[in-house]
Amino acid sequence: MTIGGEDLKTAQTGTVGRSIPRLEAAAKVAGRAEYVHNLQLPGMLHGKIFRSPIAHGRIKRVDVSAARAVAGVHRVVTGEDVRAIVADPHYGPAFHDQPILAFEKVRYAGEPVAVVLASDPHAAEEAAQLIDVQYEALPAVFDEVEAMTSKAVVHEVLRPAGAFPDLRHLQGRKNTNVALDFHLRRGDAGGAFSRADRVFEHTFHTQQVLHVPLEPFVSAAEPGEGSVTIHTASKSPSFVRVEVARLLGWPENRVRVKVPYLGGGFGAKLYIKLEALVTVLALLTRRPVKIALTMEEQFYTLTRHAASLRIKSGVTKEGRITARECEVWWNGGAYADIGPRVTQKSGFTAPGPYDIENVSIDSYALYTNLPPAGALRGFGIPQLVWAYESHTDMIARELAMDPVEFRRRNILRDGRPQATGTVMKDAAIEKVLERLAARMEWKKPFERGSGTRRRGRGIAIGFKASISPTTSVAIVNLYADGSCALYCSTVDMGQGSDTAMAQIAAEVLGIPVEAITVVHPDTDVTPYDMATLGSRSTYHMGNAVRRAAEDARDKLLAAAREAGLPAETTPIAEVFRRKYGMQAGNIVGTGSFIPAYTPTDHDTGQSPNVTPFWMVGGTGAEVEVDTETGRVRVTRLVNVADVGKPVNPRIVETQLSGAAVMQLGFTLFEKMQFDGGQVTNASLAEYKIPGMRDIPVMENEAVDGAERGGPFGAKGVGETGTFSVSPAIANAIEDAVGVRLMSLPLTPEAVYRALRAKQGKPLDD
Amino acid sequence: MTPFELVEPHTLREAAGLLASAEVRPLAGGTAVMLMMKMGVLRPARLVSLRAVEKRYSEIAAAGGELRIGALATLSALERSPLVARAAPVIAQTLRMLANVRVRNVATVGGHLAHADPHMDLPPVLIALGARVSIIDPAGGRTLPLGELYTGYLETTLGRNELVAEVTVPAQGSRRAAYLKCTTRSADDWPALGVAVVLEADGALVRDARVVISAATDTPTRLAAAENALRGARVDEAVLRRAGDAAASEAAVIGDQHGSAAYKRELLRVCLARAVRAVLDEQ
Amino acid sequence: MLGALTKDLGVAVRTIRFKLNGEPVSAEVPPHWNLVELLQNRFGLTGARESCGQGLCGCCTVLVDGAAVSGCLYLALLVDGAEVMTIEHQAAGGGLDAVQKAFIEAGAFQCGFCTPGFVLMTRQLLDENPDPTEDDIRHYLSGNLCRCGAYPEIIEAVKLAARMRKAER
């Protein structure tokens, strides 16, 4: 097999393809790994945020006098103070809609309104409770479908950021909560429905959930002479630099952004979160300022979109899906964040991994008066797969067909166009389905339990297009003794990117991975990277690193040739000694990567190339349902994925299983509860995430695959394990006890109520 | 958290004497007090640490068919005590699922009982076993059945200057007991319902029964009608159904984020039956 | 920082003495600091971290007189006279112990934020119960949360550490 004429190099002797431990393993088990959480700067002030208690209202008066009078308080800063430094203090990746601190209006309960600064965080916290703000309450909207037509309008006027051509038509639009509408039309769905033997239509719902990185959001800023240095737990240092520079009207080179390790990210720590705020506070006070959110405050910062999903399919009596129509409403909360991209990118694959001639998709990003929603491990895909794989299973049952066989008949194969018209390549959908069926021993009889314990099993399969087009740049710096530094702005938040990137560079350079240091993101030092998101790094940054390493290798070989040395056998240090006359100098290789992409047509959503690669993930679940309590125990979870050729198989496996564990929580019990827009379970005591006793027997498999465009055949994996967990479990529940749940989470009460309804004895409220 | 003064008296009675105003709070293990201070719901001017009081209030002893547990014994001391394992194995079984190891290492029995959060696991178990609680004040003290300590959510009959000193638990003896902790979200969640059942039985014939539930009600609640349905009965499905119906109708079940009241009543029927079966199967 | 605090708030700062990772130390502590703040602000030790703030996640695990506690719920003043051990404590000769090596070997962490807590709790578990069953492991560690979901690998690491400790003896 070859890539661009080169051998696909995954020799067993090489570094790529080996399960070496993480580079930072020893530091992490010894508690010495560096996080912004640990950072203390001389003279540093701590900021504590005062937040709006109401979901929507006009700010009438802000009285900070009592707070200012608290002993130890350095300063209290309001939205009006921010405007003294930043005339238009609105930020955001898709829309410039979010103020650094609220002024004139608040749009969700929990929105930052003021900040107290003090050397002692306890004093700041105490004072923040004394801030008095008067509001004129405005009508609020919380439900995403209601937001389509609601008289309550969250933003007076839409302010797209301008970077995205597909948002330009929304500039200046008024009296709407629709922050993006994505439409896709392929074939003639309406006609196909009328010709279909059977038509099925279902509506599904998903709930707001939270990322819950154990290191909560934290940022600090140090003012310099006409410059600022930001230390932040961010997955997008390059974006932070660009956006903060834009807000300040400064050139990029006066904003420095540094990121050490992250204590988890999962999509939360992207774009601007606290960075603009700490920057303004540092510039106002001329002191370093740090804001570290509490666990509670994470609930007011960024959530995952709740969604309502209507899906309709036309099917022949032989079990071929001929048409599918999807309508999706995404609850984006008060600020768009990256929601419009979630709406659009997930829209590409809304009909699922099936070969369907006639497709119609309408997907809407909506503003509501809830905390903002953004990216969360899967970028909308887990919500969509929840709907289409529940729907697919329901159709198979109605047709009395085996669910695996039904999928087999409709599966999207390489070489066939997908809903956007892009032809599938290197997407092992069929292989994932078949390996899943094999691992689940689908053809064998299944022990179904008895009495009050009923067992069932289910499968589901989903896929995702990568985020495109996005840029990564890397630098490889060979030192004179043959050791090497790799400069890249990919953020290691636990996914193992430092290790994977070092393995790629080591493979190209033919040096041991231990000889490579990965320089953490520092925008004064490491080159641009779009962000660490959407499972893009292995592919995009991996390619950039590979190119940078190849560039360095080629320069090294040229230097050897110039010195008359045998290029393949001379030690690196010897080449340097000959070239520079002593142990001195550098050989610097650079590489950048941006994949090809063709924007989708605005009206039809069609494009010959929507993604550089496809991610495919399937899950099989075995469950035991307690028919007397509705409690579901997942006894076995099998995750099968196409990840291309893994750079580090062990880390890849833990990415799959870790993602599945997270999605297991979103499936069974995680749910943000609201009362009038106010979160009522903003703590880990009341918002439960999976613990050790919630974990089933897990099996993970990366199918034998290769991504021709990826570095050494690799592609992204961080999100793949999330795709199919929810519908696999719901399908298994129906298999066990014959009830179908249409909303997440699948709580014991929801299952129990469904069982009672099925018996004709619905439980009263 | 706001600053306060910390004092450490050497006797429990002295400690009680220091609790004169609402601004002063006792601190034993401190897990609940710290949580409430962090949330800002408790802002004491002074904390009275009980750590330096007489050692006997941390001891666990068995005598005369009773366990005497000092209020300052930690939950993990209780969990590991061979005396407890022998006299009341249901307590040790309950502790394994109570909060987590770190909380059990620090939290005390007295604090656990006096906090009066209905989600706590030990109160229903100890009440079902017939525990009595001794209370000390600056002048003297009183003793009362543990069940009578609770008057509402986070509310007890404890006066401002009263402290739990000791809890006395009759050994299980020939009685058999079980505690079912029913969670509806993650396994380590607070319970939606706790059911403690203590039976005196010959085979399936129940001579005496105590049923106490927690978490689904404002206070740990003894279910007399359910006990009556079990007492004197030879347990079969019909008896369990009657006991479950009685429990579901007599308990003042409240709905919350763990489940609606209607659902928790169903849970109560099921868990009561399961707890009784677990006890009888153990014989 | 402390100077400003005591002056402004009139807080009675107390000097406490205790053993920290085997070394006798003393520190001036305001009453409302918790143990994590003491370790971070006075000794620059950041391996115990406050995350959930409610004793539920285990990121702030510290050993006080040999027992694991949640540093975020433990008043700093209460370690006066105690022996405090943190993840930064190194056994004689330095280097990693069996539990740490097993965590690396099993790939039992991703972001690493919860890892010190898991390592300390695993040591406690194996001290008490050198040969735990999987059920024992799940119960003992149920009060430690890992949002990266490395639980299967952590269970594997605990079993491996138990074997490694046995082999060492």
Image: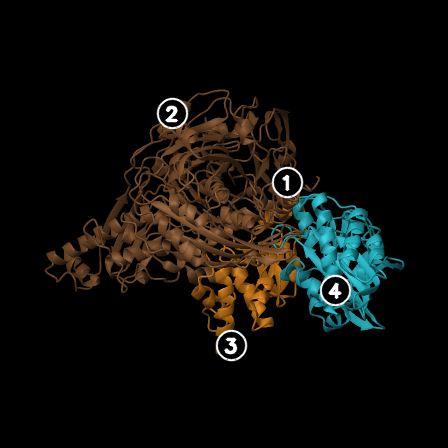
Chain colours: A brown, B cyan, C orange
Residue A332 showing in the rendered view: yes
Q: Quadrant of the N terminus of chain A?
A: bottom left
For the residues labelled 2 and 1, the Cα–Cα distance comes to 37 Å
Q: Residue at x 28, y 41 (%)?
A: A595
C-alpha gap between disc 1 and disc 3: 48 Å
**Which chain is disc 1 placed on?**
A
Q: Amino acid at mark 1?
A: Thr
Residue C166, labelled with which disc?
3
Residue C116 drawn at (x, y percent): 52, 60
Please identify the quadrant where the C terminus of chain A is shown.
Answer: top right
**Residue A202 shown left or right of residue B87 in the figure:** left
Give a yes or no on whether discs 3 and 4 share a subunit: no
On the image, which quarter does residue A357 sit in? top left
According to the picture, the residue beneath numbered tag 2 turns out to be A168
Judged left or right of residue A272, residue A77 is right
Give the residue at mark 4.
B279
- Residue that sits furthest to the bottom in the current view: C169
Identified at 79% across, 51% down, the residue is B247
Q: Position of residue A697 (x, y in %)?
A: 51, 60
For numbered disc 4, what is the local secondary structure? helix
Horizontal side of residue B172 vs A320, given as left or right? right
